[in-house]
Image (cartoon, grey):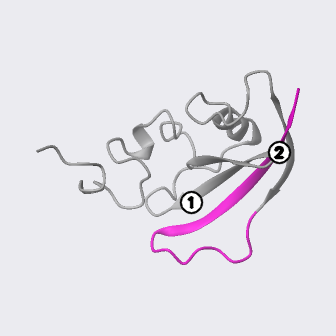
């Protein structure tokens, strides 16, 4: 009987994808920079950039790279005609204590037509 995603081992610590490690995934930018995770929060798009163990050598993405990841077809949380306008960037004072998680940076975009 085939295993479900929940039954399979993760493969590599601190990775989001089960089958493809972040550095090899177009969704996480193929190791060009630290991984970006896109969220929709009301009328805004938020992107969390993670610094995780094993990826310390990757640079933080530029604002244009973060916006490109928010517009990636697999991440898109907004309509095709919607433009993203950068509103703010911040690093939380209190970072997660999850093992392997070294910190994050948040980018917030407003949506305009």
Specify start and end residues of the magenta stretch as a single range: 91-113
Q: Residue furthest left?
A: 1
Could you say whether the residue bearing mark 1 is in a helix, strand or loop? strand
Q: Which mark is residue 90?
A: none
Percent from the top left, x then y, of residue 25?
44, 37
- Indicate yes or no whether the magenta region holds residue 79: no
- In the rendered image, which residue does mark 1 sit on? 51
The residues bearing labels 2 and 1 have C-alpha atoms spaced at a distance of 26 Å
Of the two numbered discs 2 and 1 in the rendering, the one whose residue sits closer to the viewer: 2
Q: Sequence-wise, which precedes: disc 2 or disc 1?
A: 2
Instruction: Identify the image quadrant of residue 103.
Output: bottom right
Where is 44 relative to 97, above or below? above
Tell me if 68 is positioned left or right of 58 in this view: right
**Residue visible at 64% across and 33% down in the picture:** 76
Is residue 92 highlighted in magenta?
yes
Q: Please give left or right for residue 77 compared with residue 11 in the image.
A: right
Residue located at (44% from left, 52% from top): 16
Callout 2: SS: loop
Which quadrant holds the C terminus? Answer: top right
Classify 24 as above or below 82. below
Residue at image x 43%, y 59%?
54
Q: Position of residue 102 (x, y in %)?
A: 55, 68
- Percent position (x, y) of residue 20? 35, 41
Point out which mark residue 43 bears.
2
Question: Which quarter of the image is occupied by the N terminus?
Answer: top left
Write the residue at 60% across / 48% down: 37
Give the class, few, some or many, for how many residues have Cα within 10 Å of label 1's Cα (few <14, many ≥20): many
Q: Quadrant of residue 105?
A: bottom right
């Amino acid at each position: 009987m085939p295993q479900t995603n929940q039954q399979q081992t993760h493969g590599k610590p601190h990775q989001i994808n089960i089958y493809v490690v972040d550095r090899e995934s177009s969704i996480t930018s193929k190791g060009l920079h630290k991984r970006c995770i896109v969220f929709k929060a009301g009328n805004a798009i938020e992107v969390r950039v993670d610094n995780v163990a094993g990826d310390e050598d990757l640079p933080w993405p530029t604002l244009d790279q973060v916006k490109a990841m928010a517009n990636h077809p697999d991440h898109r949380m907004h309509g095709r005609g919607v433009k993203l306008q950068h509103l703010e960037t911040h690093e939380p004072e209190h970072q997660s204590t999850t093992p392997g998680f070294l910190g994050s940076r948040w980018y917030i975009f407003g949506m305009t037509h």
